[in-house]
Each structure stands twice: as C-alpha cells, then as structure tokens.
Image (cartoon, coloured by chain):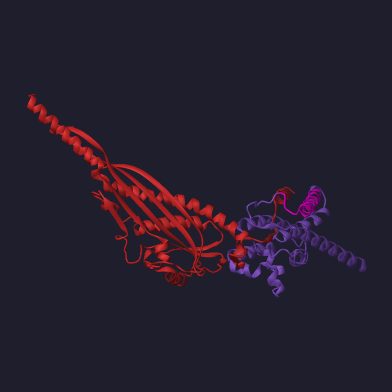
Chain colours: A purple, B red
C-alpha cells in the first residue's frame, strides 16, 4: 500500500459500478431475472448463457444488498489501485463458477448470487496486495488466509456458519466461493507467468 | 297520607313492578346468515360434484368473496326475526357492502404475506349470483383470472332479553325505563376452493360472542355496534385459524402428493429461492472487507 498506485489506476471504479448496475437492473425487472438465472433444466435445453448470467441474479433485496456491499468494497479497491485485467477475471470467474456448479452440484436446480465473483475478486486483490509492502501486505495475507479457511470450513460443514440472511429460503453454495478463489489463483499465476516469460524473452 | 290513598299508591307501585317483571319475560332473536353449501349446491338433494386433482400453480391468484344468500332470497329476506324486536331497524342489514369489503381486506392483508400468493382480488357481492354454484365460480375465474377462491359466509344471531329495568323517581312519581340485555353470537367461515378441480382445499371458522346491555331508547344503535364488533372479532379469530389451517394444509401437501399437484413456476422459485442455491456473502467476509476498505481509505488520505 505504501507503493504508489500504478499508472493504469482509474479515478472511478467504472467496471465495479457497471456490474452493480447490471445486478440491480436484473433485480428490478424480475422477468429479466427469470431469463438469466442459473436454471439447470434450461441450461440442459441449450440456454447456456445462464451459466454466466446466473451470478448477477439475486433472490431477495437482502441477498442483493449484502453481495453488492462486498462487491463495491473489493471492486473499488482493485480498480482504484489499478490492478489490471479485473474485467477479464470477472468474466472468466463467472463462467467457471457456473460450469463448476453445473458439473459438481447436479442437485442444484437454481443458483443465483454474486458472491462467487466477489470471492474471486477478493482473492485477486489479496494476491496483488501480498506482493506489496507494509501493513497492506499483512492485511491482504490475513484476508486471504481467512477467506480460504472460511471456505474450507463451509465446504466441510456444507453450510455457511454466519450467513447474514438466516430467514432466506435458499441453501448457501460454498462451492461457488471455492470456484471463484481457485479461478483467481490460476488467473493470477497465469498473468505472472506470462509477464515473467515476456520479460525473460526480451 | 290517608289509608285509601296509601293503598292506591301501593297498588300503583306494585303494578309498575309487575309490568317491569312482565317485560323481563320478553325476548327476541334476530338472525342473519349466508351459507356456502346453499351457494355451491343449491336445490340439490344429493350433490354429486366429483372433485378432480387440484393442480396448484404457484404463485396463486386468489379471490375473496362473501357468498350471497340462498337462491331466490335477497339480503333482507335472508334475515329471520322472531319474538320481541322493538326498534330493531339497526340490525336489519348485518353486513353492508362496505363492511364486507373491509372484512375481505383484513383477510387479504393476511394472505399477502405469503410468497405463494401472486395477487388477491376482492370480489364484490354483485359478481356472485345466489345459488350460482360452480358455474358462477367458473365465470368469475374467467373474468378475474383466478386460481383459488376464498368463500366467506357468516351466521350472526342476536338475542335480546328485556330483563333489567331502571327505575327513576321523578316529581310525578316513579318512571320505569325498560333495559335490554343483548347477546351477539357471530361465526365467520372461510372455505378455500380450487375452482377448476372443484376441490375444497381447507376451511377455517372464526367465532365471537359479544355481551351487551342497552336501554330501549338506544337499543338499535347498541345492537348495530354489537353486530359490527361481533364481525370484527370473528374475523380476527378466523384469520388466526386460517394461518393454522394453512400450515396443516402444507403438511398435507407433503404427506399426500397424489391428492394435490403443486407446480412451482420459475418466477415463483426465483422469488423464494426455493430448491435453489445462493451465493451469499457472510458476516465474517463482510467485516473483513469493511476493515480492508477502511484501511484503504485511511491510507489514501494519509499516505
């Protein structure tokens, strides 16, 4: 954090705002949500965009608000810090999360929520932060360790320990968080390796 | 006072008390009632309506209506009165259209909290013909696009007993004011029908007993107020019972899936998140992120 922001840093987190706007738009128009939600049966019948778009649909206002709060914080820091390829990470993780759920959770008929992408973004932010100096590095290390530990516990127990929306009528899907984290790790390593090889080839 | 005058006065007082006691023997009953059976199965000795298997497509479009009086009778003829009913004008129309709408609204507000209810239509009495049966319900279903209807009926009996008399001593002698004791028994009954299959899903009654007292001069006003209070209390009781019966019905749906078919539309599933999974941020993650965000902002201002 003590390092200066890269030159690519933007003054406004445009991608974060655009994504949030898209999620709110879907929530405001439920008929749009019906067409975009992850629906296993519809995906089998060829509506494969739902694998990607389901991440932006939300079941309730509380569901939307909590996910957007986390999304705003993470996305804004990433964009204001100027960490590159954030939109690419979001698109990639949203597709991979949908595909992982489709393959590994056949019992799920419906899935919705941005938290998988939020997990991916948090991982990406922390991996970048670990490479920096000072308190920020330790904060990011702690955050990443906490996120991984939490996700592992969720996977083992099969539920979220401290879900904010206890009254909601849907089951939490820690698999989407794990998929997001793994995608961010692979994406980050790929970027570092390609950067290294480019540097080495020169 | 002379002996003869005293005797006349004594006889006068005794007569007054006698009249008062005679008044205590007088009693009356007023009844207002409508019946779901009369509406759905009019003039049918052996009603043969074979209900099908209801297909409940969630969310449901629900209608609420008061059933009209029996075939060939209007509101007024649906009333039967016997015995002593002096100044009874106030109790003639047990439920006005406005009062019916208010009561239906109370039921509707209670139903609106359920996610499986898409919308609720309050159906005016004019839409229901006396003895209209399922043919009438089919018309309403087509007109208002309903799946399920809540048919409300009522039975209110008011007993009036002239048992208490108030005696006032005036300058001209005693004045005896006859007083009334009024009991109002009310029952509201809600029957929930799936219109297309003609199957009753569940029912819930609500009862009330209002004990009132009044003087003859304001009896009609008191009786009207008691009748109104009776309906309000019965409606509250019915709404509580409706919730209970609905919970039991939900259990029945799970236990006997062969008797009821429930179809959950995609929009309904999306609305309740039922059977689905949600990617949701938990409190631990949110607190950690807020901490990170606060440090980021602080560091930006104090580099």
Instruction: Residue A1: give x, y in percent of width and height.
Output: 78, 52
Residue under the image location 46 percent in, 49 percent down: B237
Left or right: residue A70 compared with residue A1: left
Which quadrant is the N terminus of chain B positioned in?
Answer: top left
* Magenta part, dominant SS: helix
Instruction: Residue B217: give x, y in percent of width and height.
Output: 23, 44
Magenta-drawn segment = A138-161
Q: Is residue B144 visible?
A: yes
Does the segment drawn in magenta span residue A170?
A: no
To which quarter of the image does residue A183 belong?
Answer: bottom right
Residue under the image location 11 percent in, 28 percent down: B7
Left or right: residue B186 compared with residue A143: left
Give the mark count. 0
Report the front residue among B39 and A100: B39
Instruction: Residue A154: give x, y in percent of width and height.
Output: 76, 53
To which quarter of the image does residue B151 belong?
Answer: bottom left
Report the front residue among A109 and B149: B149
Report the front residue among B133 and A65: B133
Q: Which residue is the extreme one toward the front?
A: B46
Does the segment drawn in magenta span residue A144?
A: yes
């Amino acid at each position: 954090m003590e390092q200066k922001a890269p030159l690519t840093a933007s003054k406004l987190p445009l991608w974060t705002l655009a994504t949030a706007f898209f999620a709110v738009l879907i929530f405001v128009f439920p008929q749009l949500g019906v067409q975009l939600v992850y629906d296993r049966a519809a995906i089998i019948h060829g509506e494969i965009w739902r694998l990607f778009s389901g991440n932006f649909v939300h079941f309730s206002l509380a569901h939307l608000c909590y996910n957007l709060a986390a999304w705003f914080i993470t996305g804004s820091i990433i964009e204001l810090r100027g960490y590159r390829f954030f939109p690419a990470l979001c698109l990639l993780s949203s597709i991979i999360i949908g595909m992982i759920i489709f393959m590994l959770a056949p019992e799920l008929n419906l899935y919705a929520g941005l938290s998988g992408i939020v997990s991916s973004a948090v991982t990406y932010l922390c991996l970048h932060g670990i490479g920096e100096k000072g308190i920020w590095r330790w904060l990011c290390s702690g955050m990443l360790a906490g996120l991984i530990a939490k996700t592992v516990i969720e996977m083992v127990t099969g539920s979220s320990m401290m879900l904010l929306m206890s009254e909601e009528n849907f089951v939490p899907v820690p698999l989407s968080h794990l998929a997001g984290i793994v995608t961010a790790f692979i994406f980050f390593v790929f970027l570092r390796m390609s950067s290294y090889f480019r540097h080495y080839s020169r | 006072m002379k002996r003869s005058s005293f005797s006349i006065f004594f006889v006068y007082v005794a007569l007054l008390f006698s009249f008062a006691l005679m008044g205590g023997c007088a009693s009356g009953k007023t009844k207002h009632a409508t019946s779901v059976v009369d509406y759905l199965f009019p003039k049918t000795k052996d009603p043969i309506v074979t209900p099908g298997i209801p297909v409940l497509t969630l969310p449901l479009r629900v209608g609420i209506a008061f059933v009209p009086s029996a075939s060939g009778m209007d509101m007024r003829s649906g009333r039967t009165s016997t015995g002593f009913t002096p100044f009874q004008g106030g109790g003639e129309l047990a439920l006005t259209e406005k009062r019916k709408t208010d009561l239906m609204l109370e039921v509707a507000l209670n139903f609106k909290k359920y996610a499986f209810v898409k919308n609720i239509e309050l159906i005016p009495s004019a839409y229901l013909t006396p003895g209209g049966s399922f043919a009438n319900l089919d018309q309403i279903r087509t007109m208002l696009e309903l799946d399920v209807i809540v048919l409300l009926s009522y039975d209110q009996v008011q007993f009036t007993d002239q048992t208490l008399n108030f005696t006032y001593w005036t300058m001209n002698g005693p004045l005896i004011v006859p007083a009334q004791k009024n009991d109002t028994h009310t029952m509201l009954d809600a029957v929930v029908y799936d219109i297309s299959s003609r199957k009753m899903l569940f029912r819930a009654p609500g009862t009330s007993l209002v004990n009132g007292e009044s003087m003859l001069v304001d009896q009609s006003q008191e009786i009207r107020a008691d009748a109104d209070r009776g309906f309000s209390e019965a409606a509250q009781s019915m709404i509580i019972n409706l919730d209970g019966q609905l919970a039991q019905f939900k259990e029945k749906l799970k236990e006997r899936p062969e008797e009821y078919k429930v179809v959950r539309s995609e929009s309904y599933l999306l609305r309740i998140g039922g059977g689905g999974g949600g990617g949701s941020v938990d409190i631990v993650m949110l607190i950690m992120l807020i901490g990170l965000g606060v440090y980021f902002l602080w560091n930006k201002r104090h580099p």
